[in-house]
Image (cartoon, rainbow, N blue to C red):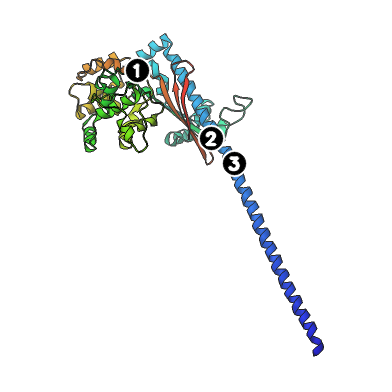
Amino acid sequence: MIGARPSSRLRLRRRDQRGVALIMVLAAIMTMTVLVTDISFGARVRSLTSVHSRQQTQAYYLASSGISIYRLILMANAQIARQPMLKSAMESMGIPSGDALWKMIPFINTGLLRMLLVADGGDVEDADAEAFKQSGQVSEAVADESRAEGGHFNNRNFLDFEGDFSVTVRGEDCRVGVNQLATRDPATPVQNTVAGQQIAGLMSGEANDQWLRDRNLDKWDLISNLADWVDTDDIVASGKGSYEDDFYNRSDSPYLSKNAKFDTQSEIQLVEGWQDEVYARFGDQISIYGGGKIDINCADDAGLRGICLGNITGCNDDMASRFVQAFHEAELTTAFTSGAVFVQWCEANGFTVSNPKLASMITTKNTYFTLTSTGLVGDASARITAVVDQSTDNGKILYWKVD
């Protein structure tokens, strides 16, 4: 019995060693598992990041392509206006030639292009055409057909790519050009300027008057503040005789009025009184671009109401509503080819013009355009906003923003 004790202790020691070894093996397996999982996860993240980065780049270039394609339409639009025979023929049909093309094509997207491309080959089913009308999306069959080989570039179709883009256009001369206040003679009250009168019209009407009263705001003070921001003197345009930078000097982070034209639309929100609610209500109806005249053929209802309220004798909210309705009815048969023609229509339809400058405030041609193009690839998207000055044949990009 005495001789068995060492053997028993040895067996216990071996069992202890086997337990330690098992723990070490389990620890090693757990470490390797964590390590492999981490490596696998990291590789997956890098792969997804790479895919998303590729898709993001593709989405950007699709959006850029949308801008380029629509610029071709704007170039063609300008060429139409320079062809006397074509211009005369279009205007005889009641179509103002200066802006005919872009108004006929207010947007372009890949769905429309794919449908047109396939329809040209005569392979569009009635069901596909109806579905496109309802949703604006093409079926997989149409999309595949539009990507088929035998196309335009080295046996590839123009639309043989992954993703989609959509681009819309807005004529900036359809809105009031606020930068025209910069040309005001300091001796001329802002109330006597064309731009001032146009903005006042937009801010008029019973609903707007009540909205301004509820906030203790005066529309002419707000318009004068815009003029003070862009004019070159230091005296307030309202004629109240104070220093135009007084408000800005009292702010928590003092700054000075710019005394130069607005460079971006959002800059308007730096002007006294034009932050938050005021900008949200009126900011979209004015533009920092444009030649100072409103294109009567693309003015929205708010712009038309503003024209009535600011330039037609006795115009109130009820008359403004009748004016807008009558104008839309007249659009179907009347070609507004100049400001004089528009004034003649007003007088002929019982809307007496009180402002002798009204004809000079109206145009039928846009020079500045905002293009908004969105590219989509997989889960990635990119949006480009560009402003184009189309006063020359090729046009010039004035603003480019990527979101």
Q: Position of residue 237 (x, y in %)?
A: 27, 24
Secondary element at tag 2: helix
* Left-right relation of 190 to 365: left
Q: Position of residue 136 (x, y in %)?
A: 45, 34
Q: Are there few (<14), some (14-19), or many (20+) residues within 10 Å of tag 1?
A: many
Q: Residue at x 48, y 24 (%)?
A: 70
Report which residue position mark 1 lands on.
Answer: 364
* Disc 2 residue type (three-letter): Ala
154 or 367, nearer to the observer = 367
47 or 210, nearer to the observer = 210
Q: Rounded to the nearest whole Å, what is the CA distance between mark 3 and mark 1? A: 47 Å
Secondary element at tag 3: helix
104 or 205, nearer to the observer = 205
Report which residue position mark 3 lands on.
Answer: 51
Instruction: Tell me the number on the disc at residue 59.
Output: 2
* Disc 1 residue type (three-letter): Thr
Q: Where is residue 330 in the image (x, y as percent from the top left)?
A: 28, 21
* Left-right relation of 156 to 284: right
Q: Rounded to the nearest whole Å, what is the CA distance between mark 2 and mark 1? A: 35 Å
Sequence-first disc among 2 and 3: 3
The quadrant in which the N terminus is found is bottom right
Q: Position of residue 151 (x, y in %)?
A: 60, 26
